[in-house]
Amino acid sequence: MLQTHTRTAFEPEHEMFRDQVRKFLLQAAVPQLDRWEREGIVDREFWLACGEAGILCPTVPQADGGLGADFRYNAIIDEELSYIGCSAGLVLQSDVAVDYLVHYASPELRQRWLPKMISGEAIAAIAMTEPGAGSDLQGIKTTARREGDDYIINGSKTYITNGQHADIVIVVARTAAEGGARGTSLILVEADRPGFSRGRNLDKIGLHAADTSELFFEDVRVPAENLLGTENSGFVYLMERLPQERFSIAVCAQAAAQRAFDEAVEYTKGRKAFGKAIFDLQNTRFTLAELATALQVGWAHIDWALARHARGELTAVEASAAKLHHTELQWNCTDVALQMFGGAGYMNEYLIARLWRDARVTRIFGGTSEIMKEVIGRSL
């Protein structure tokens, strides 16, 4: 399990919460991980169990039915999920999607959907990426045309996490022909609206348990009240919320890197070669020492950034730097750890194989490592 006795970002109440989360996941998630990987989706019953256990959307204000907790509670959930190798879309729901409703939705929308997101009855997705538009929002083709008291939405989205399960989708759509990315808006679309359909559950290299889908919108009519915030402000809202999304990815990456390292230590101590444990070979010890050092520094940085974010001080550049550093660290740790397993590391029956597959995408989603460098570079 994750060792947290040297951590500096948490109070005793956070550690009590971590103990509850760890026990819950050990019972409700760990026995199901292999099945979820095979089936390519997590049971909705698990989402409901998470809601009952109080580990969905803990930062939602008490006025909206939530706990009103600080983001450190989210980080605990993120770390524990990532450490066990669970790719369920809870992080997307609790760290990303819910904040768009909390900050920009009308009181009616908040009242209707936030309690259900907290309970697990409603699963949310964010539909931003399109077949021809990824990091560059200026390429968005999906449109939302105002017609009386409604918006008519047409277009398609792809690589959408929680796409198969989603009850509500926050759609990034173009509401003005001019303005580039600044001509976009965020509109909440309920999945039972006529004209909305889901494509296949996409076949990915990793994160197999996380359902990821194509979504299609064909003359989907939604009331104008489903607009989040004001029209043509979608780009601004996305930029406001991206720092938390990117830092959330960094937290998950650090925990997954730690699990890869721990798996490598355990395996090399138990596997013999040339008459001794692989761990006792100097190259193994030196390599593990380098990883241990990088992880130690990584946890110190996570706690520094976590404390700043809890105070509302983490900047967009700092969050981008965190995502860049920790996802690259994750990839290095998992790749080196797999190498220490030798041929066994290439076998899917070992957790290290899953950790390695899952690590590849974290340098892509939420903004690629190259985009993170661009964001950081522009600030210099």
Image: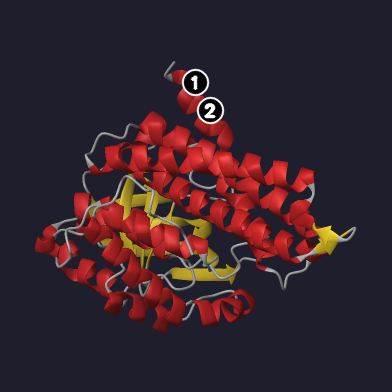
Nearest the viewer among 347 and 297 is 297
Q: In this view, does 138 lie to the left or right of 244?
A: right
The residue wearing badge 2 is 373
On the question of residue 114 being in view, the answer is yes
Nearest the viewer among 253 and 123 is 253
Image-quadrant location for residue 53 = bottom left
> Residue at (44%, 82%) from the top-left corner?
27
> Residue at (20%, 71%) from the top-left corner?
115
The residue wearing badge 1 is 377
Picture coordinates of residue 133 (x, y %)? 54, 43
Callout 1 touching callout 2 (CB < 8 Å): yes
> Tag 2: residue type?
Lys
Type of colouring: secondary structure
Task: Check the image and name the residue furthest to the right.
Answer: 274
Marks 1 and 2, how far apart at CA = 6 Å
- SS at badge 1: helix
